[in-house]
Amino acid sequence: MNKNISHLYQIAQKESRKIIGLMSGTSLDGLDIALCEISGSGQNTAVKLLEFETIIYSEDIKIEIRKVFAKKNIDFEQLVVLNEWIGILHANMINDALKKWNIPACEVDLIASHGQTVLHAPKFLHQLEKFPNATLQIGDGDHIAVKTGIITLSDFRQKHIAAGGEGAPLAVYGDYFIFGKKGENRIMLNMGGIANFTYLPASLNPEETFVTDTGTGNTLIDLFVKHNFPEKSYDKDAEIAKNGKVNQILLYHLKDHDFFRQSFPKTIGPELFGYEYVQNAMLKSSQNTISVEDLLATLTRFSAETIAEAIQLAVKNTSYRIEDFKIYISGGGANNPLLVRWLKELLPCHFYKSDDLGISSDAKEAVLFAILANETVSGGAFNFGTKKGIPSITMGKISLPD
Ligand SMILES: Nc1ncnc2c1ncn2[C@@H]1O[C@H](COP(=O)(O)OP(=O)(O)OP(=O)(O)O)[C@@H](O)[C@H]1O
Ligand SMILES: CC(=O)N[C@H]1[C@@H]2OC[C@@H](O2)[C@@H](O)[C@@H]1O[C@H](C)C(=O)O
């Protein structure tokens, strides 16, 4: 037997596994590295976050990724060289983190790498009749396995598409196992570049559970901050938006898109919520001369209202009362005080952070990928049913170190 396969077999049989989960999201802010100790699988999964680190991307990395990110027309060679380069960069970042934590690579069982999403194209967006849902994450897992010496799982989203999904959101596969609690209505709301939530009703009936994107989280806020203040990359603590006034006419036009009328589950990315989207809404509403403060207040409100309305819709027509839901927020948007204040005003729910359930709100998505790898290697028995579009599959391609 190949020694790597025999190693993998041993890892699968261990009581607990040390797995590094990696996430670099749509905000292009950096690579989140979460070292987890995971035991069990499915609903018996238990996760301990041992170490966590965000390695901030240098300006050079951001510039190179932006050349292809969320764009329809790109330099094809740039995409091909980036696929290798990001794999190497991520591997180096892991090696540096392990050195910093004083943990030898041989003590880590697996790496679970999300890669960098460069284009997310569900059918709803590309509208090409004969083509399926599509998404692309780059940063090849072979580089990570070879450079770290650790068996690496990567490219998790393709199997989800192969099984009938849109390749996202995958959060439910971690949220259900780790945060689902019978007798408690919970919503796990992640506000990254794009916002999404997992609906975990008190029944914990997998056929009632679902996950969906709601629209933009921080992506448009970040974009227009950068556009107006090139030295800034986001509206820290909503300092700019706080000085503005929501422009209701523009807000109405921002919300007037078919994506918001589509049923759950649905996914989206910065491919839709980009510069042109806001420009179009400004033109339609004749509000193209508003101040940058008012624009950022309006974009922040746009995120708050679309998230709140999606959550209200999720609970509507069920036997549950929205007042009984606990919302656990995570992602960078959880640090935006204006966004959070508006959410609290719009939703009569109880608000917490995912930290209150033991997983830091910044680390939650990286931990998710460690859980997905754990399922692939050692679980995969749980059945989510057929009603809510969650394929019962395990995900990730396996790269061996030599
Ligand atoms: N103190 C803060 N005030 C306001 N916004 C903040 C603050 N801290 C973080 N953010 C926002 O959070 C963003 C980063 O969020 P996060 O790292 O969750 O995104 P991501 O993982 O790249 O996105 P996605 O989940 O869509 O892939 C920043 O770009 C910024 O907009
Ligand atoms: C295609 C893609 O990378 N989607 C991300 C993105 O970031 C948030 C939202 O859009 C979500 O759908 C997804 O990530 C999380 C981790 C998910 O799959 O659950």
Image: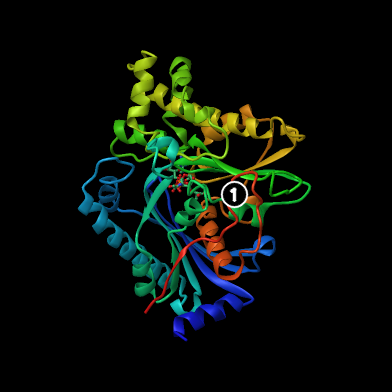
Nearer-the-camera pick, 187 or 9: 9
Q: Residue at x 45, y 85 (%)?
A: 3
Q: What secondary structure is marked by label 1?
A: loop
Nearer-the-camera pick, 280 or 164: 164
The quadrant holding residue 375 is bottom right
Q: How is the image coloured?
A: rainbow
Q: Is residue 261 left or right of residue 59?
A: right
Q: Is residue 79 left or right of residue 304?
A: left
> On screen, 127 above or below 198?
above
> On screen, 354 above or below 399?
above
Which residue is the site of mark 1? 390
Q: Residue at x 42, y 49 (%)?
A: 25
The quadrant holding residue 88 is bottom left
Q: Position of residue 383 (x, y in %)?
A: 66, 56
Q: Is residue 96 left or right of residue 33?
A: left
> On screen, 267 above or below 87?
above
Q: Position of residue 233 (x, y in %)?
A: 35, 41
Residue found farthest to the top: 286
Determine the quadrant in which ligand 1 lies: top left
Q: Residue at x 33, y 31 (%)?
A: 275
Q: Position of residue 159 (x, y in %)?
A: 48, 56
Q: Position of residue 14 (x, y in %)?
A: 61, 78
Q: Is residue 290 visible?
A: no
Q: Is residue 134 visible?
A: yes
Amino acid type for the residue under numbered disc 1? Ile
Neighbour class for label 1 at 10 Å: few (<14), some, many (≥20)?
many
The quadrant holding residue 249 is top left
